[in-house]
Amino acid sequence: MAVPQIAGISNQPVVTIKLASTSDELMQCYALRAAVYMGEQHCPYWEEFDGNDYTASHLVLYVDGEPAAAMRLRWFASFAKFERAVILKRYRSMGLFMPFVEWAKDFARKKGYAKAYLHSQHRLWKIMERGGFRKVDDRVFHFSDHEYGAFVCDLTSPDCEVPTIFTDPMLLNRPEDRLDMPGVLEQSMERGASNPHAGWNDDRRAN
Amino acid sequence: MNILSQSIDGEAVTTKLAMRMEDSLQAFAVRAACFMGELDVPFSEEFDGHDFGATHVIAYVGEEPAGAVRVRWFQSFAMLERLAVIQRYRGHSIGQVLLERCRKLAEGRGCNMLYVQALPGDVSYWEKLGWRRLVPEEAGSGAKRIVAMIKAVDPSKPLPEVEAPESVVLRPEPQLDSSGRPLGSASN
């Protein structure tokens, strides 16, 4: 999965999407969510930062290098849950939402997921349907002052190998948004297995 | 001295210094909500590279982060920046509570002058709180116009009406390169 998903041409803004993989990128996701949910939608801090940020994958979208959109993905056994999708006010109506969701779907698909699931605010239901999602059932529920419905989208099989326990172990060690490119641990293989702490076991046994 | 609100709807108003990552995140979230969400400031301007050389003070209403301010320490003064209060908590003097906490912090450090770069529209707010213009004229142009203002840390010892010390002369925020040096400065 190449990192620049939508290449800019001529004077078009350059849009890039990536998995947040540093604390700075994570911080950008948090800032975007705080701007939209706390700043615009008046969500309380403790509802926005609900304790699930450190069990999730975070995606960040840049427009000409500036953080513009973020999304959180959580991994359940049989589906990936897309959450906290925001686009900063100044970047709306650029058509970023659907490509961002498609990128997230592709990401989940390449991890082997067959279903993407999300809770959509009522006002966005039509958009979610256009994006290939359908309502799970007729239930409408509410939290953080908004009405939601549960949506699901079947993900097609990716054109690459889906990771399993029989996949090349080093492939599973790669950065998750670049499973098709060698990762830093593959480079470390050149150093061989010198086992630098060999022999510690006897000396350092827990008492 | 104004009487500052000690509680809002039964919830205590408290302040604390950011001492842990989670505290800093709360200060950043409050600023992102106000400056990025409400005022459309881009991320790269709001988070300008000075956050890790600064002290952050957070105000809480109950457990909820409601306001934040950043203090940068200079040799002869403390610079207060990025003062923000979440929209629904405005009108309860939380800004003043934060500023008072900063004043005490500066006092404890032996600092005798507080300094802000105010937006022209906010000058009357600062003046009501006892601040005065450092120089009569504004600096910058357009949306970037700012007014340098100062206040004595000890209210019983007002700052003398003298020319600004060299170190307080208004200067633009340096833009930093990726290694944290001011742009255009010599490398290495």
Image (spheres, rainbow, N blue to C red):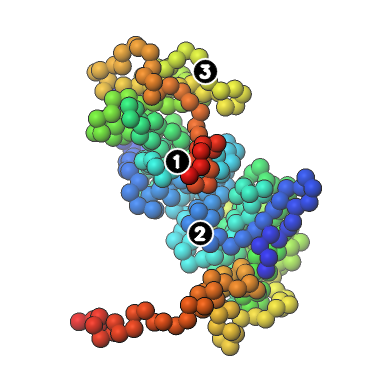
The crowding category of the residue bearing disc 2, from other C-alpha atoms within 10 Å (few below 14, some 14 to 19, many at least 20), is few
Crowding at mark 1 (Cα within 10 Å: few <14, some 14-19, many 20+): some
Q: Nearer the viewer, residue B92 or A139?
A: B92
Task: Specify the amino acid type for callout 2.
Answer: Thr
Determine which of the numbered discs, if any, sits on residue A183 in the image.
none
Rounded to the nearest angstrom, the CA distance separating label 2 from label 3 is 40 Å
Residue B50 is labelled as: 1
Left or right relative to B8: residue B109: left
Q: Amino acid at mark 3?
A: Glu
Which residue was labeled with disc 2? A22
Counting from the top left corner in percent of width and height, residue A95 is at 74, 52
Location of the N terminus of chain B by quadrant is top left
Question: Is the residue under label 1 in contact with that under label 3 (CB below 8 Å)?
Answer: no
Question: Which residue is depicted at the point 58% across and 79% down?
Answer: A171
Residue in the foreground of this view, choosing between A196 and B48: A196
Do dots 3 and 1 share one subunit?
yes
- Of all chains, the one bearing label 3 is B
Give a yes or no on whether discs 2 and 3 share a subunit. Answer: no
Give the SS element for disc 1.
Answer: loop
Which chain does tag 1 point to?
Answer: B
Same chain letter for marks 1 and 2: no
In the displayed structure, A171 sits above or below B150; it is below
Q: In what element is the residue under mark 3?
A: loop
Secondary structure type for disc 2: loop
Residue B149, image x, y percentages: 42, 21
The residue depicted at 67 percent of the width and 68 percent of the height is: A1
Relative to A164, is B172 above or below? above
The amino acid type, in three-letter code, at marker 1 is His
Q: Residue at x 71, y 51 (%)?
A: A14
For label 3, the residue is B138
Question: Residue B75, image x and y in percent?
Answer: 33, 30
